[in-house]
Structure formats: structure tokens, C-alpha cells
């Protein structure tokens, strides 16, 4: 889509929100391999970890926002590392990846339940022998 081409043509995605609910746009930018600078508001920290897969700045602080963007432009290797980690994180949070994690958790929970049931059954048998 055209939107993804725009993401990929950018040196960075700058998200200067003062309020945020679910920042899907940040995941979209990560999925296109774009480094992110975002304000530390709402659920942004569910997507962006400062210095790991993007940069976080205080809301309503244009100087901090500008400094963060400049740090990416001045250090392309740093920007590339943030973008690469963001891309990896975005790939790990696809619907398919999440559904596999949930299915694994359910299998694990069912296995634990079977173990508990089996243990209770064995304890009950031992109790009946006495």
C-alpha cells in the first residue's frame, strides 16, 4: 500500500501525541523498519521501549523531541539498530505470533491441569488403601 511506501521513505517516524490510546500507527512504522521518536504518553510504552526499539520523550517538550530526531539523523547506525529491533518486535506481535503464544499457553495450562488431576487421583488411591 501507498502508506507503507511513505513509512519506508522516512528517516524516522515522529509521534508527538499528548494523549494516546492504542498506538497502532507505531506498530505499523516498526513493521516497515522505521525508527520511532514518540512522546511518553498513554499506551505508547506498550510498543516503544526507550533506547531499545525507539526513543521516548516527555510530552509537550518540543526541544526534547527535536533533540531525539537529531540524534537519529546524526547517528544512522543507532537509528538502524532501533529500527531493526522495532521490526523484530513488530514481527513478534503479529496476530499469527500472538495466536501461537496463546495456543501454547492453553496447551501448557491443560497439561498442568492433567498433572494436577492425575496427582489428585493418585493421592485418592493411596488414601483408599489405608
Image: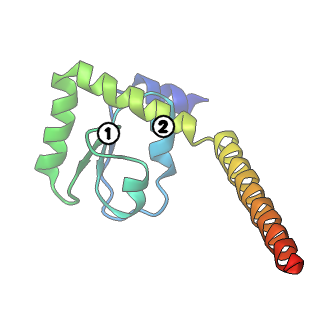
Q: Is residue 128 above or below residue 13?
A: below
Q: Residue visible at 37% across and 54% down?
A: 45
Q: Position of residue 101 (x, y in %)?
A: 65, 46
Q: Which mark is residue 54?
A: 1
Q: In the picture provided, is 70 more to the left or to the right than 130?
A: left
Q: Residues within 10 Å of mark 2 (few under 14, many from 20)?
A: some
Left or right: residue 30 compared with residue 103: left
> Farthest residue in the front direction?
130
Number of the front mark, 2 or 1: 2
Q: Residue at x 19, y 60 (%)?
A: 60
In front: 33, or 15? 33
Circle 2/circle 1 CB separation < 8 Å: no
Q: How many marks?
A: 2
| Local SS, label 1 | loop
For this view, does 121 lie left or right of residue 86?
Answer: right
The image quadrant that residue 97 belongs to is top right
Q: Which mark is residue 89?
A: 2
Amino acid at each position: 500500500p501507498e502508506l507503507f511506501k511513505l513509512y519506508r521513505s522516512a528517516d524516522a517516524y515522529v509521534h508527538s501525541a499528548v494523549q494516546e490510546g492504542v498506538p497502532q500507527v507505531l506498530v505499523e512504522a516498526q513493521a516497515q523498519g522505521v525508527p520511532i521518536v514518540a512522546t511518553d504518553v498513554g499506551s505508547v510504552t506498550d510498543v516503544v521501549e526507550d533506547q531499545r526499539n525507539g526513543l521516548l520523550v516527555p510530552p509537550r517538550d518540543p526541544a526534547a523531541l527535536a533533540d531525539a530526531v537529531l540524534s537519529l539523523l546524526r547517528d544512522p547506525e543507532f537509528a538502524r539498530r532501533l529500527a531493526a529491533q522495532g521490526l523484530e518486535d513488530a514481527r513478534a506481535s503479529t496476530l499469527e505470533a500472538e495466536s501461537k503464544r496463546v495456543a501454547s499457553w492453553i496447551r501448557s495450562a491443560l497439561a498442568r491441569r492433567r498433572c494436577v488431576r492425575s496427582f489428585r487421583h493418585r493421592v485418592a488411591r493411596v488414601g483408599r488403601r489405608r
